[in-house]
Amino acid sequence: FTKDDENVNSQPFMRWRDRFLFVAEALYKAQAETGEIKGHYLNVTAGTYEELLKRAHCARELGVPIVMHDYLTGGFTANTSLAHYCRDNGLLLHIHRAMHAVIDRQKIHGMHFRVLAKALRMSGGDHIHAGTVVGKLEGERDVTLGFVDLLRDDYIEKDRSRGIYFTQDWVSMPGVLPVASGGIHVWHMPALTEIFGDDSVLQFGGGTLGHPWGNA
């Protein structure tokens, strides 16, 4: 899998429909050459829900397996509607948390990402960026693991050291896989797998390309 950047939308230098078509062509070419399923997170975030749905529908018509949404800039109601659309139409939904730092780094009047993550689980999505502990988007390990568990586990015991202030029972609500992304490269692999385990997504981008041993 590869992905759009969260800031890639439909700017004059890269209109969304052109990008979707180019990406779909490259995906099918790669699949034909390798015999493997390929995917690209197509960012369908838009200024209105109607435009968002138009882009998601185009992605489905092209036969791609996954789309992406910036859920904080797009809004929770739009995200929930998109999550239902993706489930009904066999699309995976990758969630990006762009703009979270404006909200969760304000210690006096902000809202912790733990709360934003729980709200996302209720809204819908298959996986979401959750920091890395190592790499560019570092976070305190215990606190990060606290909201990672809140995202993907069914039952989480109270543990104040990890920021879990009451026992959470999600009953049958589906979980969301945490995504480790941001400034990571191959040397982070042992730490990432030890921290996040198997039920996670690891995304290697600029941290790998820009590494002295990378290809940038």
Image (cartoon, helix red, strand yellow):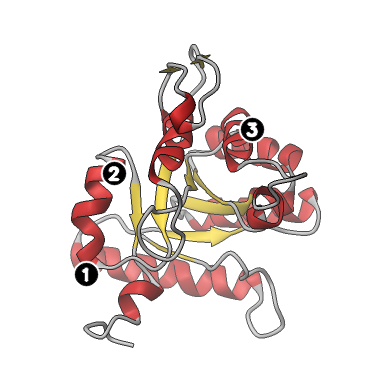
**Residue 116 appears in the picture as rendered:** yes
Residue at 72% x, 39% y is 76
Expressed as whole percent of the image width and height from the top left, the position of residue 113 reads 59, 42
Q: Which of 28 and 10 is in front in this view?
A: 10
Q: Earlier in the sequence, mark 2 or mark 3?
A: 3
Give the side of residue 153 with respect to residue 85, left or right.
left
In the rendered image, which quarter contains the N terminus?
bottom left
Rendered location of residue 195, percent (x, y): 29, 44
Q: Give the residue at mark 1.
A: 33
Q: Which amino acid does label 1 sit on?
A: Glu
Which tag is nearer the camera, tag 2 or tag 1?
A: 2
The residue carrying mark 3 is 119
- Under mark 3, the amino acid is Ala
Instruction: Between label 3 and label 1, give the one nearer the viewer.
Output: 3
**Residue 195, numbered circle:** 2
- First-in-chain label (3 vs 1): 1
Q: In the figure, residue 32 lies in which quadrant?
A: bottom left
Q: Is residue 94 above or below residue 34?
A: above
**Helix, strand, or loop for circle 2?**
helix
Which x, y percent locates residue 175? 46, 28
* Quadrant containing the C terminus in the rendered view: bottom left
